Image (spheres, rainbow, N blue to C red):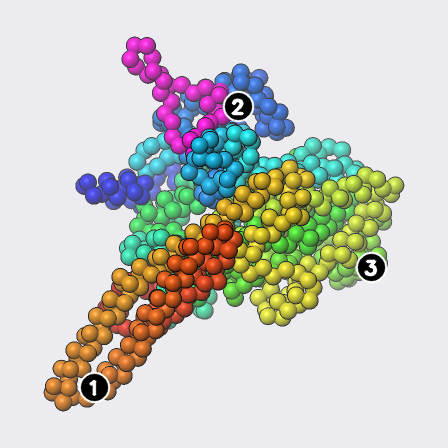
Amino acid sequence: MAAIQEYAKIVGTNGDSAHKNKPSKDAGNPTKVFGSNVFNDRTMKERLPKDTYRALRETIESGKPLTLEVANVVANAMKDWAIEKGATHYTHWFQPLTGRTAEKHDSFISPTSDGGVVMEFSGKQLIQGEPDASSFPSGGLRATFEARGYTAWDCTSPAFLKEDGQGNVTLCIPTAFCSYTGEALDKKTPLLRSMEAVSRQAVRVLRALGNTTARRVTATVGPEQEYFLIDKKYYDQRLDLITSGRTLFGAPAPKGQELEDQYFGAIKDRIAAFMRDLDFELWKMGVSAKTKHNEVAPAQFELAPIFSTTNIAADHNQLVMETMQKVALRHDLVCLLYEKPFAGVNGSGKHNNWSLATDDGQNLLEPGKTPHDNEQFLVFLSALIIAVDRHAGKLRAGAANPGNDLRLGANEAPPAIISIFMGEELTDILETLAKGKKASGKGQHYLHIGVDSLPALPKDNTDRNRTSPFAFTGNKFEFRMVPSSASISGANTILNTIVAESLDEIATRLEKAKDVNKEAAAIVREAVNKHGRIIFNGNNYSDEWVKEAKKRGIPNIRSTVDALAEMASHEAVKLFEKYKVLSEKELHSRYDIYLEQYAKHINIEAQAAIQMVKTQYLPSVIRYTGDLAGAIANLKSVSAPVSVQKELLTQISVLLDSAKNKLGDLEEALRKAQAVSDVRAKAVAYRDKVFTAQAALRADIDQLETIVPGSYWPVPTYAEMLFKL
Ligand code: ADP
Ligand code: MG
């Protein structure tokens, strides 16, 4: 029993196996459970006095500061609601630069004079917190002796309750995390700033085009999350998975994904049970889990929510990842979020669906039916073309992490080269407009922009290109490079900011123009003429594209170490400072932190690889060679033929010897990299020396795996992990 409880503590379940997999009676009724653990608009309306509700709404919508008086009333209502639902604690929930979320739980208790306690929660406690979070990476933005970081309530993302499998309920208040001097120490702060920036510039463009009603423009995001599930009993036996999230060794299984029988295949009962519980847990927290299906690789799956504002989408995506991992354990499964857990089959990413929505109800990337929409659409589309072409390197940086280095450019994921897929018809229209000509295509007539009677643009949903890293999919862009394990905040912060810049320039031109329609036409024309090279509708996986992209001058940034540098350049500093998204200090500290994280990550992998080889693979192979030698001696003693055994023994011994040498090389490379002190040089040493030495070692071990009997092999194989589910 004690062991079960211990296990439960680790995995966050109640450890009662009879309880496992038991569907909740409400699980099948989303209307009942959805948002039941969220202090959402409905709950606020119900529980707050009218004027408090109105004041809070105004803060949420326009960013007007909240008075302490209002905060006190909100805090009290929130506390009562949370306590009724079983909460004893609250936490300022924040997103440090680790890419995960952080929480420190405080109970509501406050002592009374007679030795008891009452439950209290003040407006001040709601608005601001001071977690002594000195151990989070800050890149020198604060020294540990003045370690205080502050958390500040982000009331635009609703507070919610987190339940664990043991019945603990905690009130989570989404917060931004910054230093005493106001520098961002987290992922949320710059994201909120970038949303502000893109909103301001988009509204200017709309005004200039004659829209008088929109007051705000929100960047909307729907992140599709890919993941793997494997049986926990296999996971527990693999030090590589436990420590670094991916298999550092493993010969390919006889079968991979070539039969295409997994993608959209029938979902197995065990997985369906997991997915049902996952949906249920997410719905309670207001996460709109919508679509679930089998993905391309064996044991790979996907979950997509309904899109929302970028900051809520980012918060929810964190909850999705966390809940996937928790719920998987309840089913004796482990959820792998790493970008490339298994060599040879597809890795995981996040398709970051992105658009701009106005508060007067328009999707600015919706081609629309009327000429007016059409002009507006083409102007916003131009802003995207300009931004992505100008800042492809920065976007690439937004998708950089060690796992993605194994994925991007492999033959299944978008390459490391950023380009835009527009679809043929839209490309035709853009190219024709760029020539200042009347466009006609597919029996339809397209007149140039600026003329009164523009036709509706075709909404192109059918012509999809799965190989593009940045694809226009009808009424939104899909940024497909985002790493599966990372926060989506970084990528979206960059996307919002670079679009803010091009919208700013466009707005300035339109505001000054005598003839707005003519100017809009000129803007579209110039965008295509100057930046059209970024549009590529062909096969992004092909070698020809790599060559062609080079000719066009589009960057091909293959590694995280190089990609990160794009965000630390002088030009990047100017851009992000101009739109008040990240200061030079913040950018440089992030650069250091991410480089350090990269080095640490490869360091962990190397250490795990060395340990596995020394304590598992080599001893097992040696045992087998010993047994083979014994068999040979025995056979010889009865004068039986031994040529097959001898040949095998030689083959294995050669590989064993080679593996031993490569192990030595890896240890040496690791020692050297560990001794480097400059952050960038260290990351480079890990990439060029340690990572490569480890890959070389893997090759020998994987080859040994194919000839050493399974009964000697110390860890589960790819076939077991990927197909025994
Ligand atoms: P698929 O790309 O697989 O065809 P969908 O087009 O239905 O799937 O949508 C994928 C994701 O894009 C979903 O999360 C969806 O909510 C999101 N999405 C749809 N419209 C928008 C939008 N205007 N802004 C941001 N995300 C959107
Ligand atoms: Mg999609």
Mark earlier in primary sequence (3, 2):
2
Q: Amino acid at mark 1?
A: Val
- Numbered label tally: 3
284 vs 564, left or right, is left
Task: Look at the image and tell me in which quarter the C terminus lies.
Answer: bottom left
Magenta region includes residue 120: yes
Quarter-wise, where is residue 203 in the image? Answer: top right
Residue in the picture at 32% in, 40% down: 12
Q: Residues within 10 Å of mark 3 (few under 14, many from 20)?
A: some
Residue 480 in the image: above or below residue 282: below
Task: Name the mark on residue 642.
Answer: 1
Q: Position of residue 539 (x, y in %)?
A: 61, 66
Q: Quadrant of residue 589?
A: top right
Q: Give the residue drawn at x 56%, y 56%.
A: 562
Give the SS element for disc 1: loop
**Mark 3: is the Cβ under 8 angstroms from ligand 1?**
no
Q: Which residue is mark 3?
A: 435
Instruction: Give whichever of 87, 708 is nearer the camera.
Output: 708
Instruction: Assess whether mark 1 and mark 3 are in contact (beta carbons under 8 angstroms).
Output: no
Q: Which label belongs to residue 45? A: 2
What whole-number distance in Å separates the C-alpha atoms at marks 3 and 1? Answer: 78 Å
Residue 527: in sight, yes or no? yes
Give the distance between the C-alpha atoms of the residues marked 3 and 2, in whole angstroms.
54 Å
Residue type beneath disc 3: Lys
User: Mark 2 or mark 1: which is in front?
Assistant: 1
Judged from the image, the secondary structure of the residue bearing numbered disc 2 is helix
Nearer the observer, disc 3 or disc 1? Answer: 1
Residue at screen point 82% across, 50% down: 522
Is 506 within the magenta? no
Q: Nearer the viewer, mark 3 or mark 2?
A: 3
**Residue at the outermost top position:** 114
Give the residues in magenta.
104-133
